[in-house]
Image (cartoon, rainbow, N blue to C red):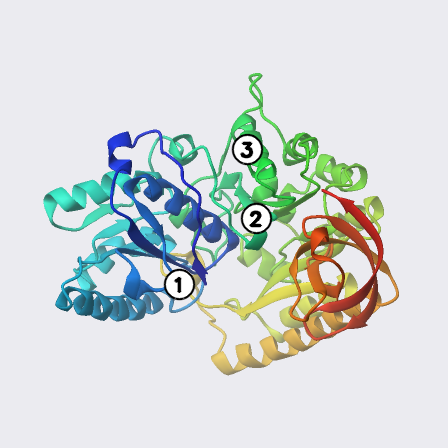
Amino acid sequence: MTATPTSPAMPASSDPASAVQPPRGLHVITWGCQMNVYDSARMADVLRPLGYGPVERPEDADMVILNTCHIRERATEKVFSELGRLRKIRDERVGNGQDRTIIAVAGCVAQAEGEVILSRAPYVDLVLGPQTYHKLPEMVARAARAGGAVIETDFPVEQKFDFLPTEAAPQTQGNLTAFLTIQEGCDKFCSFCVVPYTRGAETSRPVASVLAEARRMAESGVREITLLGQNVNAYHGDNGNGGSATLAGLVEQLAQIPGLGRIRYMTSHPRDVDQSLIDAHRDNPALMPFLHLPVQSGSDRILKAMNRGHTADEYRESVRKLREARPDLALSSDFIVGHPGETEEDFEATMQLVRDIGFAMAYSFKYSPRPGTPAAGQPMQVPEDVKDRRLAELQALLCEQQDAFNADMVGTVQEILVTNRGRKPGQIAGRSPYLQPVHFDGPDHLIGSTVKVAITTRRTNSLGGTLIRETASAC
């Protein structure tokens, strides 16, 4: 996935004179979660005063940033493969008399493997963790002065958000939807996860900072925001009155911003689903009825081994309360099969939980050892062929549930945020409250509005419908 954000902005720490520069090409390659997408946009923002603007190809770039993810297996090798390709591109540029491309590795692989990257790929210029990208202008200057690699992977005392430009770059087509990071890091220390080691401890942005960025987004045309965090429902940002706000309290304030009609959040932890958040789903119509709530396993024994801090029945009870508060709520989740020690009985408990809950969509993976995590050194590693079989069985059930959920949409009327033109002449498209793409005939002037659509068709990855009311209001 490649992020090519735009929008001029000046970081507080940059020299205004540095903005007077010939145009330079910036190409950002983004892997991983939505938070990385947001981070890529913000990295482009802090580099814009240095004269960097987006280009589509690394061959045309004066700087290439790999914004990396360390969650999945072989993430590091994927980075080195891409670095080898970029090195060839840079050598060709130099051979053609062009400026030498700056190569930067950012994100979680950089945080976890910074010294390894510089050892195996000494041609890399910049290595920076996810908490230090606000220092990019300084790092570029240091690399130019020193003529060697610069690495920044410490966890700084200051929050990077205090040093970012005041204007966010558009992140999606038409600038109608956007990601907004409000919380980072994790204190849960699940046995399989590297996030606490790459993103650090849980920290939350102050309410005023979040509201200010959300207002700027709404003023620029954004109609839907997704609040991001490793444990977003653990949000506890400074409320400006000597206390802290909950996620529910923050959502209530965000919903009052003119033009901002839809609010989502991810990723949540079951331990942080409190009553205030359940009530927010009942009382706040701006909060979309689609919740990503990872459970990982349906076996209490495996949940304990994972250090999840909850049981399968506690998860079921949270879901029951949420659905009681918001009957049209749909769920997505994450599942890991083959965690060390998982038996057939444990796997069947996961399958039963899926049957009990019913999911509109889900992400499922085979367990893969991440160096430095407790589970990586545990005995009773599950054989790969067993993981493969279990994953196939789980995905078949999850796909069946997703198909059934989409089929149930046919015959209903949904409010669709129109985001763009469709592929066919006279067609427009948008997203349902459940994030399903929906295509239907309608005029272009409805882009940016929320309209009522009768769903008539279920396709493999989208829905079709008929426009029945031009609400024609900016959410």
Q: Which residue is mark 2?
A: 175
For label 2, the SS is: helix
**Label 3: few (<14), some or many (≥20) within 10 Å?**
many
Q: Is residue 153 left or right of residue 337?
A: left
Q: Residue 66: x and y, percent?
A: 34, 58
Q: Which amino acid type is marked by label 3?
A: Val
Residue pointed to by mark 1: 377
* Residue 431 appears anywhere in the view: no
Q: Earlier in the sequence, mark 2 or mark 3?
A: 2
First along the sequence among labels 2 and 1: 2
Q: Marks 3 and 1, Cα distance to the nearest angstrom?
A: 40 Å
76 or 256, which lies in front? 256
Residue in the picture at 15% in, 68% down: 96
Q: Is residue 61 above or below residue 366?
A: above
Residue 210: image tag: 3
> In this image, 356 relative to 145: left or right?
right
* Quadrant assignment, res 58: bottom left
